[in-house]
Image (cartoon, rainbow, N blue to C red):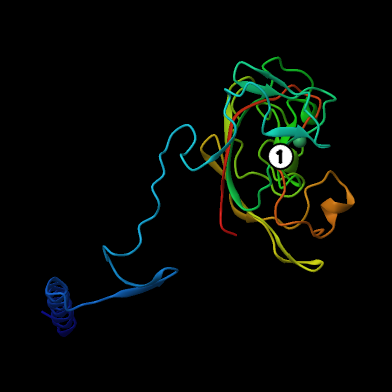
Amino acid sequence: MTRTVLLCVAACGFAVLAGCATQQAAEKGEVRQYVETDTGRWLVHDVNRPAPPKVTPGKAPGDAVKLFAGTDPDLSEWTDTKGNASKWIVRDGYMEAVKGAGYIQTKRKFGSCQLHVEFATPSDVKDSGQGRGNSGVFLMGIYEVQVLDSYNNHTYPDGQCAALYGRNVPLVNACAKPGEWQSYDIIFHRPIFKDKDVVRKPTFTILHNGVLVHDHVVLQGGTGWRGKHAISDYEPHEDKGPISLQDHGNPVQYRNVWIRELAD
Ligand code: MG
């Protein structure tokens, strides 16, 4: 056996012995590792460390605010953008955009959040590009996650379904067929402003039909259509705003909309 091989064997043996010694020490409670957390300094595997609150899972988690459960007889959580009753249609457990009715928005306002939305673009396929099944989910009433029928329908990628409109192209096209129910699960952290400056830009993580399409993306500015806001920096706004859904002239349907507020 060469000298090198002998050295390797010795080193491995020492490592195994050291590992055994560490394990034995741990079993005797002699190795105490701590972690610093938001709730204090805790021993690793400490049973006294505060457990997270219990949430009942389901169609909507137990601690979610249900914005449209599908059983609502009316749009009690929603208005048009002027605060009046919306002309969107409610039927068969969903609400549907009506051409000319304008955007619909929540009465309540939200900042950082987890938002679940289910939607369906029209099964009666008409038009192409941006004219097919166009709508949108707006966080804080400002930042648009595009809704579009992008199933065999090419358009500019930063405006296809699940794009952060005009800014970020989704990682993949996870669109279902027209008329099929689809879902967005959006984890959003709002922008923070100090005076006129944005000191923390918003972030988006989005699953489209359970598929990751934005992985903690930092939004670099507004999401307007070739407008000043789209190519300029942020314009300061309040800490909370409504969730709004776009009327783009196509009868896009929505159901099971719920939200959980998150810490900034
Ligand atoms: Mg849109």
Q: Is residue 184 left or right of residue 37?
A: right
User: Could you tell me residue 74's position as x and y percent?
Assistant: 67, 23
Q: Position of residue 161 (x, y in %)?
A: 68, 35
Quadrant of the image occupied by residue 149? top right
Q: Is residue 152 above or below residue 44?
A: above
- Residue neighbourhood size for the residue with mark 1, other residues' Cα within 10 Å, grouped as few (<14), some (14–19), many (≥20): some
Tell me: 130 left or right of 40: right
> Quick one: which residue is furthest to the right in this view?
228
Which quarter of the figure has residue 121? top right
The reply to whether residue 186 is in sight is no
Say which amino acid is labelled 1: Lys
How many numbered marks, from 0 up? 1
Residue 84 falls left or right of residue 2: right
Q: Quadrant of the N terminus?
A: bottom left
The residue shown at (38%, 47%) is 54
Kindly identify which residue carries mark 1.
107
The residue drawn where x is 81% and y is 32% is: 84
Vertical position of residue 249 compared to residue 261: above or below:
above
Ligand 1, what quadrant? top right
Question: Ligand 1 closer than 8 Å to the CB at disc 1?
Answer: no
